[in-house]
């Protein structure tokens, strides 16, 4: 994107690399800030956007982009603390609906049962008012209220580990490769990565995406075991594993940030 910066009396077009700046917080989450160039502001300031779930960096005209970027990075701790308090965060609690492999689940707190976390399948709702939508499965969580968010997160991470490692290994086998190790992390700048030693790493939040999206990322990283690049040969391998991948990639671009609101 092209922004207008003022240097001296000469209005020049400065090539901002983006209209956003990405900051890495102490918990290693990447936060994207919207950048507003202001002719009235006298100093760089950062504020939480009360209507959205992001933050806005206000930069006076004429301030170099690098300086704005440094300022934002210095405020990473403050940013992380304040964003965590945002109403748009979706905390795991009774009644919250979340998507697991593309299927909707409603969290149901059942404090008296001692069964950990389990799924109770949806009952078909033959009700015109639901507009043909099937009911949600229940994600039942026993134990104390205070422990519920951690229990749900742990459960989701376990599901992610099972799904992702079996799929990544199956894709690798098709390419006559072996996966040295699969790690599940809370990365936010990348959904997956592949090391030169054959270790694959993935974000647990992929379990919140549709099944085909999770599968595409598994195939993508498995294909890197053969081609450590994004050459046409690499994309041919991905296509051989999962067919067309463009829609899945687009889904992640559009909805990826949404997955980071949970937990
Ligand atoms: Zn890649």
Image (tube, grey):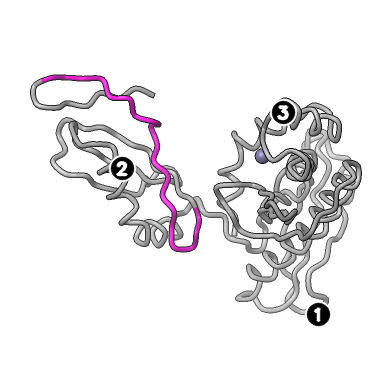
How far across and how far down the image is residue 76, in percent? 37, 57
Is 27 a magenta residue? Answer: yes
Gap between marks 2 and 1, in whole Å? Answer: 47 Å
Hey, which residue is sitting farthest left in the picture? 9
Q: Which residue is drawn at 25% across and 23% down?
A: 4
Q: Where is residue 220 in the image (x, y as percent from the top left)?
A: 74, 40
Q: Which residue is drawn at 59% across and 34% down?
A: 254
Q: In the displayed structure, does residue 246 sit left or right of residue 186?
A: right
Per the rendering, the mark at residue 57 is 2
Residue at figure coordinates x 78%, y 41% from the top left: 226
Mark 1: which secondary structure?
loop
The residue wearing badge 1 is: 114
Tag 3 residue: 247
Q: Where is residue 72 in the image (x, y as percent from the top left)?
A: 32, 49
Residue stretch rendered in magenta on the structure: 10-29
- Classify the position of the N terminus by image quarter: top left
Instruction: Please give the label number shown on residue 260.
Output: none
């Amino acid at each position: 994107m092209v922004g207008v910066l003022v240097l001296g009396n000469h209005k020049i077009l400065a090539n901002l690399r983006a209209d956003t700046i990405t900051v890495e917080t102490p918990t290693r989450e990447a936060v994207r800030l919207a950048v507003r160039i202001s002719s009235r502001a006298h100093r760089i300031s950062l504020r939480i956007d009360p209507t959205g779930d992001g933050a806005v960096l206000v930069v006076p005209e004429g301030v170099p982009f690098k300086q704005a970027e440094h300022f934002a990075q210095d405020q990473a701790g403050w940013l992380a603390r304040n964003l965590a308090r945002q109403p748009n965060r979706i905390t795991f609690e009774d009644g919250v609906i979340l998507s697991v492999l593309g299927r909707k689940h409603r969290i149901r707190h059942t404090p008296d049962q001692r069964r950990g976390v389990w799924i109770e399948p949806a009952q078909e709702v033959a009700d015109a008012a639901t507009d043909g939508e099937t009911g949600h499965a229940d994600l039942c969580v026993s134990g104390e209220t205070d422990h519920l968010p951690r229990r749900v997160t742990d459960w989701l991470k376990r599901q992610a580990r099972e799904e992702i490692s079996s799929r990544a290994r199956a894709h690798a086998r098709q390419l006559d490769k072996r996966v040295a190790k699969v790690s599940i992390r809370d990365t936010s700048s990348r959904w997956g990565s592949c090391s030169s030693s054959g270790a694959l790493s993935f974000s647990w939040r992929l379990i919140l995406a549709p099944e085909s999206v999770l599968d595409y990322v598994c195939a993508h990283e498995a294909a890197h075991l053969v081609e450590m690049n994004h050459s046409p040969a690499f994309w041919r391998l991905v296509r051989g594993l999962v067919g067309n991948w463009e829609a899945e990639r687009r889904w992640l671009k559009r909805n990826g940030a949404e997955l980071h609101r949970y937990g």
